[in-house]
Amino acid sequence: MKHTLKITIVLVLLFIAAQLVGLATITNYIQVDKQLTETGEEKITINYPDTALGEQPDIDKEDNTEMTATVTVIFFALIIGTVLLLLLIRFNLGKLWKIWFFMAIFMALSVSFKVYTNIIAAFILGALLAAWRIFKPNPWVHNVTEVFIYTGIAILILPLINVTGAIVMLIIISFYDMYAVWKSKHMVKMAKFMTNKKLFAGLFVEYKQPKGKSSKKAAGKTVKSAILGGGDIAFPLLFSVTVLESRIITKGLTKSVALSQTLIVTLFVTLSLLLLFLLSKKDRFYPAMPFLTAGCLVGYAVLMLF
């Protein structure tokens, strides 16, 4: 097992929290509109209210061309972000990363909080928590903000993608993750950089290493870092909310019933993460997305049996 049982449980519980908060918040965010067509059939559509960052895009998610464009844009945005971060690492521009990271956290948190409050309060709370995390980091603020950050990201992407597009994206990201961790290893390099700067994008827990085990030293104490990348939280959540939306539209379910059924996906993706932690070995890096993608797809297959 890569980490101690206690830390493994903590990481898994934080992952579950991020998934549940995201699902609950987005269930509250989306608006279901039912109308009768000229033939007397009921047509269900999903509306997306304005976010803290403005109006949501209006596209036809049943258009395969639109879905292809969305998946392509998301993937290339990921590549561009990766290249920029590697350049910051190459030229030791940690301060620029801090500014970039602050803005990303601030915007994502603001979008999440806007679902529950007005825009001014959302901006203030988002800015305060982002500043606290960046300039006065501590494990509690770090991981609490992580729970809400990916909800904001999912809210912004959901109007652009459906279940099919999300599945394609999961598969592509899984192959990319394997290449980035096992082949080029640039994902490992980025993770070490962000961890050292205490500006890691993802779940982050430090714990004391049992005596006699190899480890690194920090602040005079023997410690290890348990991490789970932000993408490993965001992509399963995004898939789950597309499933939630699909259940409402295709099955005519209420939001609460659709949410309860989507939890099947959450269960299986959580089990896949737990399996990864149990099978992984100490002091090695593993691509989590292949496991999480498998969990998502198995959970979705089980759900489709209903």
Image (tube, grey):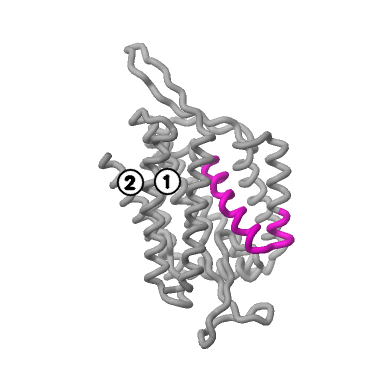
**Residue at position x 59%, y 77% in the image:** 223
Q: Write the start and end of the magenta stretch as one range.
A: 131-156
- Residue 132 figure quarter: bottom right
From the top left corner, tell me how far across and down residue 41 is, in percent: 33, 17
Q: Amino acid at mark 2?
A: Tyr
- Residue 43 figure quarter: top left
Question: Which quadrant of the rendered structure holds the N terminus?
Answer: bottom left
Q: Secondary structure at mark 1?
A: helix
- In front: mark 2 or mark 1? 2
The answer to whether residue 269 is left or right of residue 59 is left
Q: Nearer the viewer, residue 59 or 34?
A: 34
Q: Which residue is mark 2?
A: 300
Magenta-span inclusion, residue 189: no
- Residue 171 seen in this snapshot: no
Q: Are marks 2 and 1 in contact (CB under 8 Å)?
A: yes
Q: Amino acid at mark 1?
A: Phe
The outermost residue toward the bottom is 212
